[in-house]
Image (cartoon, rainbow, N blue to C red):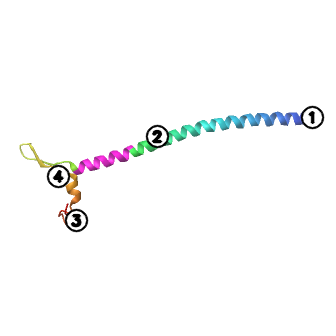
Amino acid sequence: MGSLFEELEAREAAARVRVEEFEAELAAVSAKLELAREGLERLRIARETVAEVLAEMTLQMPAVTVDAAGSPAGERVSGWRRRMRGPSGRSSGC
């Protein structure tokens, strides 16, 4: 019966080594996953920031019309003035 227990101990040791190897692989993959998540979050924030900036720039861009001769004419209305107007179109007092 001694050899049976020796075999079981050898198998247990081999299984322990495999578990330790898998744990090390899991730690490495978890670290890579965390870095990928951080990169994804940075990209999401960058996309949202760019969308906000573009939206603000669109509000501040001049209204351009083109006459028959092709020369642009327009008036620039700053974004703060638009935001200061109430629903009736009147200035809110600022």
Tell me, yes or no, whether the two marked residues, 3 and 4, touch with CB atoms within 8 Å.
no
> Which residue does the image show at 22% across and 52% down from the upper left?
79
Residue 8 vs residue 81, the one in the foreground: 81
Q: Give the quarter of the image for residue 22.
A: top right
> Which residue does the image show at 90% across and 33% down from the upper left?
3
Separation of disc 2 and disc 3 at Cα?
41 Å
Residue 48 vs residue 80, the one in the foreground: 80
Q: Is residue 84 above or below residue 8?
A: below
Where is residue 86? Give x, y as percent.
Answer: 22, 64
Q: Which residues are magenta?
A: 46-59
Q: How many marks?
A: 4
Tell me, yes or no, whether the two marked residues, 4 and 1, touch with CB atoms within 8 Å.
no
Q: Which mark is residue 39?
A: 2
Label 2 residue SS: helix
Q: Which mark is residue 77?
A: 4
Residue kind at label 2, given as amino acid type: Gly
Where is residue 30? Give x, y as percent.
Answer: 58, 40
Separation of disc 1 and disc 2 at Cα?
56 Å
First in sequence: mark 4 vs mark 1: 1
Q: Which residue is mark 1?
A: 2
